[in-house]
Image: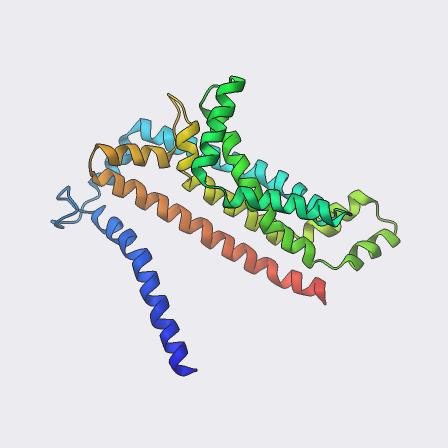
């Protein structure tokens, strides 16, 4: 057992090193005064200053944040409703069908989803830009929210609902005062996952974005094609830090909500 635990620790260390070494390499050279990623000549914040002086890039950052927040909020509302519909579906065949359709969207390649939306928007005449990107992000975020919320609903004991109904609570009271408070950790998990996916998405956004509107992922790709610049390093570093803040925020929220869940089960 000790040998297995040591092997697991070594294995995890190697995996995390492979995953994070390129990121920390990128962050390290974002402070290089030499302007290249081949030799570190000295510490500087010049690339970050350049980044914040670029008004076009700041608008793109604002666009990305607005799209992420809107898509995460709307997809959370739709996803919670969808998870409730799946969980409380009376017919098992209908429940399995809905769950399978939801899972298909999870495993479908982003290229296919992006191309499908591009064809759809072209046919119905929606101009590529803010609206097309928002609709696409909502579409691929909803299944994620459903998968985050559904286990919490199925974990909840039906006796809690029956007890509330026996005490005279209306269906709305049961939903707002019993079900939603219980599944709040799942709702937060779904929201933060949707927010992260929206911030990081490139493949779908690349298909549905138009002239005059873009997001950070597409802009970083465009900058990288022109040649290696440490502005990309600085921008990627800030994006990585923001994502880490979201993950830490979600961790503390879920940790704070965990004791209340345990009290309910008791």
Quarter of the picture containing the N terminus is bottom left
125 displayed left or right of 23: right
Residue 42 location (% of width, % of height): 13, 49
Task: Please name whichever residue, 177 or 157, is drawn nearer the observer in this view of the structure.
Answer: 157
Q: Quadrant of residue 111?
A: top left
Of all residues, the one furthest to the top in this rendering is: 125
- Residue 258 visible, this orientation: yes
Residue 147 location (% of width, % of height): 59, 49
Q: Is residue 178 above or below residue 213?
A: below
The residue lying at 26 percent from left, 43 percent from top is 233
Colouring method of the image: rainbow
The residue lying at 46 percent from left, 39 percent from top is 198
The residue lying at 44 percent from left, 28 percent from top is 208
Q: Quadrant of residue 55?
A: top left
Task: Please name whichever residue, 49 or 220, is drawn nearer the observer in this view of the structure.
Answer: 220
Quarter of the picture containing the C terminus is bottom right
- Residue 126 visible, this orientation: no
Of all residues, the one furthest to the bottom in this rendering is: 2
Q: How many marks?
A: 0
Q: Is residue 6 above or below residue 118?
A: below
Q: Quadrant of residue 207?
A: top left
77 displayed left or right of 127: right
Residue 185 location (% of width, % of height): 60, 53
């Amino acid at each position: 057992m000790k040998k297995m635990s040591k092997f697991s620790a070594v294995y995890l260390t190697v995996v995390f090193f492979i995953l994070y070494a390129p990121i920390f390499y990128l962050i390290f050279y974002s402070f290089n005064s030499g302007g290249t990623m081949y030799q570190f000549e000295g510490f500087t914040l010049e690339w970050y200053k350049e980044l914040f002086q670029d008004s076009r890039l700041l608008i793109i950052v604002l666009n990305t944040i607005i799209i992420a927040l809107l898509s995460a909020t709307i997809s959370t509302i739709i996803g919670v409703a969808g998870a409730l519909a799946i969980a409380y579906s009376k017919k098992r065949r209908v429940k399995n069908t809905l769950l399978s359709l939801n899972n298909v969207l999870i495993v479908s390649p982003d290229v296919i989803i992006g191309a499908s939306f591009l064809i759809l928007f072209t046919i119905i005449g929606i101009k590529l830009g803010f609206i097309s990107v928002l609709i696409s992000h909502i579409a691929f975020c909803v299944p994620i929210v459903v998968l985050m919320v559904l286990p919490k609903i199925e974990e909840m004991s039906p006796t809690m609902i029956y007890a509330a109904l026996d005490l005279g609570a209306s269906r709305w009271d049961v939903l707002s005062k019993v079900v939603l408070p219980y599944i709040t950790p799942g709702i937060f998990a779904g929201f933060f996952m949707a927010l992260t996916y929206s911030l990081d998405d490139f493949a779908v956004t690349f298909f549905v974005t138009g002239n005059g509107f873009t997001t950070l992922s597409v802009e970083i790709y465009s900058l990288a094609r022109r040649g290696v610049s440490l502005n990309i390093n600085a921008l990627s570093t800030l994006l990585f830090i923001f994502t880490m803040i979201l993950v830490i925020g979600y961790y503390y929220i879920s940790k704070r909500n965990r004791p209340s869940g345990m009290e309910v089960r008791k």
